[in-house]
């Protein structure tokens, strides 16, 4: 009986837990990996994200200016 109560409590806790969210970050060219991680940690510390949320990082290279333009 004790094990069944624990399983039931686990189901209730999972049902009440907030769903993990996904957060997206641009990784700037002049930024280091440590700086990007610091921005992610700051978002968690500020309450905008939780440690169970997912994070996706994007990089983008700006196109070179045309020489003739």
Image (spheres, helix red, strand yellow):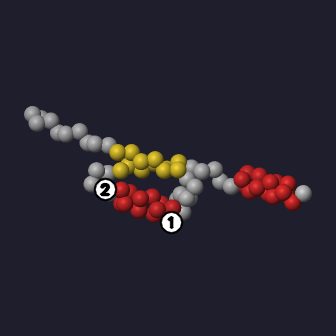
What's the mark number on residue 63? Answer: none
Task: Please name the residue shown 26% across and 42% down the image.
Answer: 62
Which structural element holds mark 1? helix
What's the mark number on residue 31? Answer: 2
Of callouts 2 and 1, which one flags the residue occurring earlier in the amino acid sequence? 2
Task: Please name the residue shown 87% across and 60% down the image.
Answer: 2
Which structural element holds mark 2? loop
Nearest the camera: 30 or 5? 5
Q: Is residue 20 left or right of residue 16?
A: left
The C terminus lies in quadrant: top left
Instruction: Report which residue position mark 1 lands on.
Output: 45
Nearest the camera: 40 or 10? 10
Circle 2 or circle 1, nearest the eye? 2
Q: From the top left corner, tell me how far across and down residue 41 is, in percent.
A: 46, 62
Q: Are marks 2 and 1 in contact (CB under 8 Å)?
A: no
Q: Residue furthest left?
A: 68
The N terminus lies in quadrant: bottom right
Nearest the camera: 62 or 41? 41
Q: From the top left corner, tell me how far across and down residue 44 is, in percent.
A: 51, 61
Taking the image as drawn, is residue 12 in sight? no
Q: Residues within 10 Å of mark 2 (few under 14, many from 20)?
A: few
Q: From the top left corner, tell me how far across and down residue 52 is, in percent.
A: 58, 55
Task: Please name the residue shown 52% across and 50% down the image.
Answer: 54
Between the residue at mark 2 and the residue at mark 1, the CA separation in whole angstroms equals: 20 Å
51 relative to 55, above or below? below
Q: Is residue 54 left or right of residue 64?
A: right
Occupied quadrant, residue 35: bottom left
């Amino acid at each position: 009986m004790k094990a069944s109560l624990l399983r039931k409590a686990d189901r209730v806790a999972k049902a009440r837990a907030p769903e993990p969210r996904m957060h997206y970050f641009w990784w700037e060219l002049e930024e280091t990996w440590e700086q990007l991680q610091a921005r992610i940690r700051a978002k968690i510390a500020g309450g905008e994200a939780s440690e169970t949320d997912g994070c996706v990082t994007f990089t983008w290279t700006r196109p070179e200016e045309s020489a003739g333009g």
